[in-house]
Image (cartoon, grey):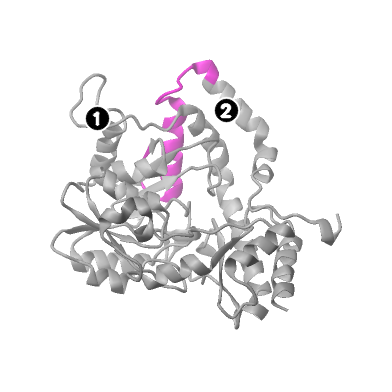
Amino acid sequence: MTISNKTVPFVDLSLQHQPIQGEIEQAIASVIQRGDFVLGKSLQQFEEAFAQASGVDYAVGVASGTDAIALGLKACGITQGDEVLVPANTFIATVMGVIQAGATPILVDCDPHTALIDLNLAAKAITPKTKAIVPVHLYGQMVSPTQLLDFANSHNIIIFEDAAQAHLAQREGYTAGAVGMAAAFSFYPSKNLGAFGNGGILITKDEDIAQTLRSLRNYGAPKKYYHTQVGMNSRLDTLQAAILQVKLPHLSQWNQLRNQAGQIYDQALQSLEAQTIVPIKNVSQEGHVYHLYVIRVKPEYSVSRDRLQDILGEKGIQTGIHYPIPCHLQPGYKSLGYQLGDFPQAEMLCHSILSLPMYPGITSEQISWVVEQLSLIQA
């Protein structure tokens, strides 16, 4: 392959799946043989393993990361009339989960360097109705656990982590999901730990929360045909759990490979950083699991972010934008009452960020090719 006809995919899941394909097929066959497709043996085994890996006592599998937020908040006691602090710079599922829990999302702007929620601004958004904060560990990097705990203790609110992009991420001695009262994860196929379809999980150290969620995910029934709550049908399929159980032991190594790739990107981009290309800052060192590698394209760059994405695409380099429209400007969420200019840092990021190819197994040669093209465009 010559440098002129190289292609760099945004993500390549085959590099993870090919070496363990036999194990995955065997796990699927075992479920088929048992026939326990709903709330089966593999689900229980995976829940126990994921909880242990995350440093908590309980895990409850659900149908999606969004359900993990909505049902998880309910299990933590969040209800109608409560306000929940949420970063404006996040995927819409975070806001959606709060609304589905019956609460009101109160958006907060972000730190432009890390893209994470700005806790100083969050403090200004506190009201007597504020009951929780949902820090989003965005792109694979955690919000500071020590600052979060201080914040929650100072304002007497709970921490509910959105760790959908941060499986086994670490910071300040904490693992993602082990900081607050509970945490939600997604197993969408492209996540660091991805299923072969949709899936999610809630983890917690609190047995009562876990028990409540097991009921909520299963029609509000702690036992069959006995419905004590208004729940829903949201269960992680046994087949998906079996697949995730095979993949989980490899997750730490995959995360290390992502972190190494992130360091290679950081080093290679130094020549462009001072003027035009600025990577989202890693303040977690080896604890950053780089679900995404995100850069900011400054106005001084020779072309716009959108034009840059087009040019890279023409060269066979796939990229993404996470996310092009901030939550408060999404048409379906006008009822929240926000408008253009309310969260300037989130709005700035949405117009300037670009996600570069990132996955376990991306080579240093591929990264160098991506950065070389960025340099040539700038020149």
Q: Quadrant of residue 72?
A: top left
Rendering coords of residue 210 (x, y %): 29, 39
Q: Which residue is mark 1?
A: 220
Foreground disc of the pair 2, 1: 1
Helix, strand or loop for disc 2: helix
- Report the residue at 48% width, 57% height from top: 169
Asked if residue 363 shows in the view, the reply is: no
Instruction: Say which of 13 and 95 sits in front.
Output: 95
Asked if residue 302 shows in the view, the reply is: yes
- Report the residue at 73% width, 68% height from top: 373
Rendering coords of residue 322 (x, y %): 50, 58
Q: Mark 2 or 1 closer to N-term?
A: 2
Rendering coords of residue 261 (x, y %): 64, 62
Quadrant, the C terminus: bottom right
Q: Which residue is mark 2?
A: 27
Q: Quadrant of residue 174?
A: bottom left
Q: Taking 293 as reference, is 200 left or right?
A: left
- Report the residue at 40% width, 62% height from top: 89
Is residue 46 highlighted in magenta?
yes
Helix, strand or loop for disc 1: loop
Rendering coords of residue 90 (x, y %): 41, 58
The local crowd at label 2, few if under 14, some if 14 to 19, many if 20 or more residues have their Cα within 10 Å, is many
**CA gap, disc 2 to disc 1?**
30 Å
Does residue 132 sit above or below 40 in this rendering? below
- Read off the magenta span: 32-60
Q: Look at label 2 and name its amino acid.
A: Ala
